[in-house]
Image (cartoon, coloured by chain):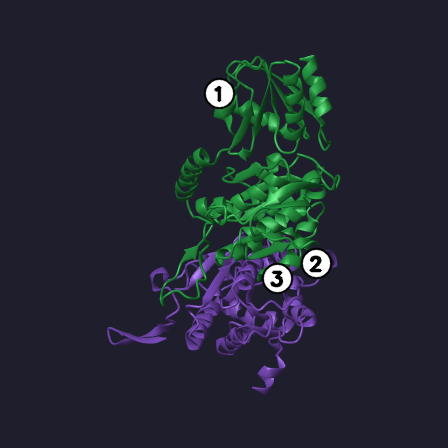
Amino acid sequence: MAEVSLKGEQRVFMTGNEVVAWAAVAAKVDIMYGYPITPQNEIMHYWTRLAPKHGKKFLQTEDEISAGFTSLGGVLSGAKSFTATAGPGNVLMQESAGMAEMMRLPMVYIIQQRGGPSTATVIYAQQETTLTCFGGNGEGHRIVYSTAGHQDLFDYTIKAFNTAWKYKFPTFVLGDGYQAKMREPLTIYDPVEKGIELVKPEPIIGNTKKPTGQFKHLRNTFNTEEELYEIVMAHQRDWDAAAEELVEWDAQGCEDADVIIVTHGIVSRAALGAYTQLRAEGKKVGYFRPITVRPFPGKQLKDAMKNAKKLFVAESAYGQLLKMVQTNLFGSPIKIETLLKPGVGITSEEIYQECQKL
Amino acid sequence: MQELKENGIWQPAMPTSWNEETKPHKFCPGCGHGIILKVLGEAVDELGIKDQMVFGCDIGCSLLAWDFFSIDTVQTHHGRTTPVITGMKRANSDIIGVAYMGDGGGYAIGSQHLFNSAVRNEKITIILCNNCNYGMTGGQMAPTTLPGMKTETSPYGRDIEQTGAPTKGPEMVAEVAPEGAYVARGTISNPRQLKGFIKKALENQMAGRGLSFVECLSSCPTNWRTNAKQTWEFVEKDMAQYFKVGELRVPQEMKEG
């Protein structure tokens, strides 16, 4: 691998997995715990090459369950910790994500989606959107950033650690196999030099430098319904408040649009291409992209579509984004057209052609 | 450990690492957990490691120990205490990490974690309570249920043709762990010996040699449906006959020391 510097702004040409490893170094991450699964493997490959040079650690675990729980251990110790996975590995990681939600542990997961269900393909999909937002036996008290490319992967991996440690909710960077494996140019940087403050981690328990006699007891099991209710509702209130601050979206040309294209992740790149072309031809088309798919920018989408007649939802899954849109627009009479291709990529041309029909 | 005299009567001493506010503890009468946690508390007191220690407990009856000690504690998921303590220790090697679990947590749902932490010789201490059944969930067959033993899911007695023979955990760990590992099986019927094993298991971690694993033969009269005499006989005779008590692996330096 090429050695690059995080001094100043560097223009680089990298795969997305390499970008994530560099972003973790830039975010001053202490330790990664991981288990091999395609298409995220190179995050570990690059991290294990970078780690010793930057005083960082790595542990290859026996499975994704262990990768999730050892990462939670790292977080408890006060280390900035993360893991990365995909597909069936993401399914196994949800157990640890549930514990992170219940115990408010600042855990960061990088997800590079592959085809599903089951083993499916190692290539690409957006079929882990529901799982990543709502996996586990709870209410989805987590933050999910859906990235659209390499600059996003760098920016939002750094941001994910800040979000996790500030708000104490498990935080996911939701990429995919295309972003993981392809190369594209981006600018990498030292966030501190750029004035981005990095939230400092601290031990949650196991502070070996604490004054004698202090101790904390952490648990995720409770005796009564009421006891649990109070805790979950407190988390819900915190999550609602955090959602207001954390929700991110991108909207372009929606004010006078008849049709608004709604996409997330890398499909929004195709959508942006189609939108630009259609606008150049004088068509009244808008573009809306949730960047956080959890919390979902429902209010913002409602504002954006005030004057629109139709939404056009396109995704590489069979209705996972669509369901989020429908839930958030409940009661709205707007017509929704779709292009749903589970596990298959979507091009600008397809979105362009579908929009021509509307 | 402090000696207490109340109303002119000497009271049993309570380890100072115990959290007095949560005593009496929550385990059933006749349960062995209290004895294991007492000798663990005494060993922690003698080594003076309360402030460096993190105690992790599993799901199952062991979770009832979540507020047992005046020590930093994390209660995790079923089978996941080993990876949580492993992760903590990997991130901060100054921690003395103790993972406490039952036979279901260690030998069934978390067996991959026990096996692989042994192979990697993680510098942690694992203490496992073997009571031949799943206590918290109401007495189902466990990996350690003895041949012919009746449980809720082996109501006609454990058929080893169908369900395999009881898991011998320390033997397995002793087989796969590299040099530096400490492995023993103690019993609540010999607390003095058990305390010695647990103390060595902590010292071995403090010396940074490798994995320390102690299985403790324990009792579950509630689910065994046994009286005091039958309970004690089952621990001392039936269990000890199948699960041999003693040290299985002692690091070279410890033998010399």
Chain of the residue under the numbered disc 1 shown in the image: A
Q: How many marks?
A: 3
Secondary structure at numbered mark 3: helix
Q: Residue at x 61, y 50 (%)?
A: A22
Residue B255 in view in this figure: yes
Display colour for chain B = purple
Identified by mark 3, the residue type is Lys
Q: Is residue A139 left or right of residue A336?
A: left
Residue A267 rendering spot, x and y as whole percentages: 66, 30
**Residue type, label 2:** Asp
Question: SS class of the residue under badge 2?
Answer: loop
- Residue B31 position in % (x across, y down): 48, 63
The residue to which callout 2 is attached is B159
Residue hosting label 1: A303
**Foreground label between 3 and 1:** 3
Instruction: Judge the density around disc 1: few (<14), some (14-19), many (≥20) Cα neighbours within 10 Å.
Output: few
Q: CA distance from mark 1 to mark 2?
A: 66 Å
Asked if badges 2 and 3 are on one and the same chain, I answer no
Q: Which mark is residue A53?
A: 3
